Each structure stands twice: as C-alpha cells, then as structure tokens.
Image: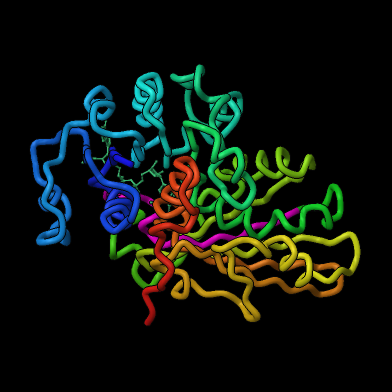
Amino acid sequence: MNVAIIGASGYTGLELIKILINHPKFDITYIANSTGNENVQDLHPCLKNVLNVDVQKADAKEVSKVADLAFLALPHKTSMFFAKELLDLNVKVVDLSADYRLELEAYEKHYCPHEDKEHINGAVYGLPEYYKESIKNTNLVANPGCYPTASLLALLPFIDYIESGSQIFIDAKSGVSGAGKKLSEASHFANLNENIHAYNPFKHRHMPEIEEKVKLLKEKEFQINFVPHLIPVTRGMLVSVFATLKEDIDVQKVLEESYKNSKFIRIRENVVDIKSTAGTNFCDIFVAKNGKALFVNSSIDNLLRGASSQAVVNANLMCGFEEDEGIPKIAYVP
Ligand SMILES: NC(=O)C1=CN([C@@H]2O[C@H](COP(=O)(O)OP(=O)(O)OC[C@H]3O[C@@H](n4cnc5c(N)ncnc54)[C@H](OP(=O)(O)O)[C@@H]3O)[C@@H](O)[C@H]2O)C=CC1
Ligand SMILES: CC(=O)N[C@@H](CCC(=O)OP(=O)(O)O)C(=O)O
C-alpha cells in the first residue's frame, strides 16, 4: 500500500517516517512540506544513510498519482484544505490535526470556520479501542489529540460508575514536543529547564474534545475540568484523572474487563511513568480508589500513541491489516 506524508518536516512527520520505513505493508511514495526542493536528510539529518528521498511541495493531485493513503501531519486549519482535495481524489486520509475530530458546531466554536463541511460528518475518531469497526470502514480518520487520547483511555471505562452531575478533574503533563517544532517563549530552554507550570486551565481546546467523546460514546454528560502542564522533557505524557464513584466498586476488575482485548493498553500494578511508554504505542494505565474517590493514571508517548503510531494503527485498520503491524512496542529505556 503506497502512502504519502504531508508535513514531513515536523515532529510527528519524522515519527511517521521512522515507523513507515520499516512497515511490512506500507511503502512511502511521497513526502512533502510547504516548500519542497530539498532532500529529507536536509530536513532531518538523523536520516542520513537511512532514507534518501526528495521532499515535494505538497500537491494533492501529485499525491493521488502515487499514493493510496495520506498522513496529514499539518497544523489545524491547513489540514482540511488538503484533506478535502485528497478525499475528492479518492485518497484515504489520516489527519493528525484537530480539523475533523469535533462535530461541526463545536469545531467552529473552538477553532475557526470549517472549510470542508462536506467531509466532516464522515470522519471517524481514530481511537481504536472504541471505534475500531468504524475505522475499518472509512476513508477519513481524525486522529485524536495527545491529551484526549491519554485522558479518554483512562476515563471511559469508569464513566458508567461515576456519580451523575459530579465533577471530573484531569491533571495532564506533557513534554515540550507536544507543541511542535516551532520556536516559542514557552519552549525556550531557559524557561522550560528545571521548571513546570500549568497552562490554559479550564480553557484548553482539548476539554471540549474529551467532553464530546464521553457524551457520544457513553451517552452521558460530565463537566470535564482539564488542566494541562508543560514539563521539562522532550517527549512523554502523564495524565491523572480524579472523580467520585456512585459506590465502592472493584475498579481493577472494571479496568481489566474494559481492555481485555486491547493490544496497546497495559494495565499496571503500580503508578505509571513516561519512560516506560516513550518510543511505543502503548498506553499504560493504573487505577486506585479511596472509598468512592477514584484515581486513574495513564501514560503515553505524545508523539506516538498521542499522534504518529496511533495514526499508523488507524491506517492498518483502514487498509485491512492487523492493527499492530509495524507498530513500535519497545520503550526507550533507560
Ligand atoms: N506534537 C505532538 O505531540 C502532537 C501533534 N499533533 C498534531 O499533529 C499535527 C502536526 O504536529 P507537529 O508535527 O508537532 O507539528 P510541527 O509544527 O512540528 O510540523 C508541522 C508541519 O507542517 C508543515 N506544513 C505547515 N504548513 C504546510 C503547508 N501549507 N503545506 C505542507 N506542509 C505544511 C510544516 O512544514 P514546513 O514548515 O517545513 O513547510 C511542518 O513540517 C498538528 O496538527 C498537531 O496539532 C497531534 C498530536 C500530538
Ligand atoms: C505541549 C503542548 O503545547 N501541547 C499542545 C497539544 C498538541 C496536541 O497534541 O494537540 P492537537 O493535535 O490538538 O494540536 C497544546 O497544548 O496545544
């Protein structure tokens, strides 16, 4: 199956290249950014003696000549312009941006006017543990954000057991690669090193994404109180969910039952950490309770489970392959 990577010069674009170079069923036939006219080794020197291909200036018609599926590792708002063209040219799309994740009204409230209203209703949310059959039967997957991935995988098994109308709190911590390759005050070493801080408390655009998926999947509405933090590491994401149970239940059994067939969920006996998932598509989850107080702890690699490896799992399913074909499983430990 021939695939294209548009946005190859970014962090998730490089992660896609690393996975797809070794994938048994996918061949990279097109790599692009916004300018082209250079070799991929100029964009990513780590690929010298590994991959020697020219980077194109992204063009949907050219993609349709050489690829069956395209990964869009582009900023929001940019993605939907390419997705619209590619879908009309019968190219399957896995979009890593937020452009197709939300229902139209929510998207336009939190982002901008949508430029591809024709396709947004046909998009499938790319969280395989909950949408696997729909992913297999669509041409457009909206890959979840990293925070929503780690938060929803921790929270969803317990939604039916949480007190109606009670508050749910999510404390999330992300490495700085979550912000992408662009330089910013927040990602400046002197500000980031030996430091940690919250940002956009109760205002982050991932809060509606988490709330919407809880409502769509569980037909229940909860106010999600989401507070992200930036931590002084390159990659990694740790999420802590706090909620109130209706009654004292066997939380370990609920978690094990929810994910008994999930290849990329590891239920841990102790609290989770970010090094054990870095470099892999795994989501590690730990749960504890104190009477009716619930604590669920999850860890992912924001660039992999939070983006690129989850995107390739979705592409595997869209193309009829085993979900774990060519997917990284060995952590960068120590
Ligand atoms: N970083 C993370 O942990 C996660 C990121 N995401 C999402 O994935 C997407 C990519 O993220 P990330 O890799 O971090 O972002 P980066 O900012 O690192 O990379 C974005 C890429 O998009 C390319 N690009 C921008 N505009 C165009 C254009 N018009 N035509 C072609 N290429 C273009 C840029 O290439 P150039 O400038 O060279 O032209 C750059 O390579 C974003 O939507 C992000 O929100 C989702 C989950 C996790
Ligand atoms: C550390 C950091 O800045 N993280 C990004 C999340 C990036 C991401 O995964 O979300 P999208 O795909 O929705 O952009 C942020 O908080 O906006």
Residue 175 lies within the magenta run: yes
Image quadrant in which the N terminus is located: top left
Magenta stretch bounds: 168-185
Q: Position of residue 236 (x, y in %)?
A: 44, 65
Residue 123 can be seen in this image = yes
Residue at the location (78% across, 40% down)? 219
Q: Is residue 271 left or right of residue 161?
A: left
Q: Does residue 185 appear in this view?
A: no
Q: Magenta segment: does it hold 197?
A: no
Nearer to us in this view, 103 or 108: 103
Q: Residue 118: x percent and y percent?
A: 50, 17
Q: Vertical placement of 252 versus 215: above or below?
A: below
In the rendered image, the residue lying farthest to the right is 247
Q: Nearer the viewer, residue 118 or 106?
A: 118
**Residue 241 falls left or right of residue 278:** right
Residue in the foreground of this view, choosing between 174 and 250: 250
Which one is in front, 155 or 173?
Answer: 155
Q: Quadrant of the C terminus?
A: bottom left
Q: Position of residue 42 (x, y in %)?
A: 10, 50
Q: Position of residue 262 (x, y in %)?
A: 61, 61
Q: What residue appears at the point 91 percent right and 64 percent down from the top-left corner?
A: 247
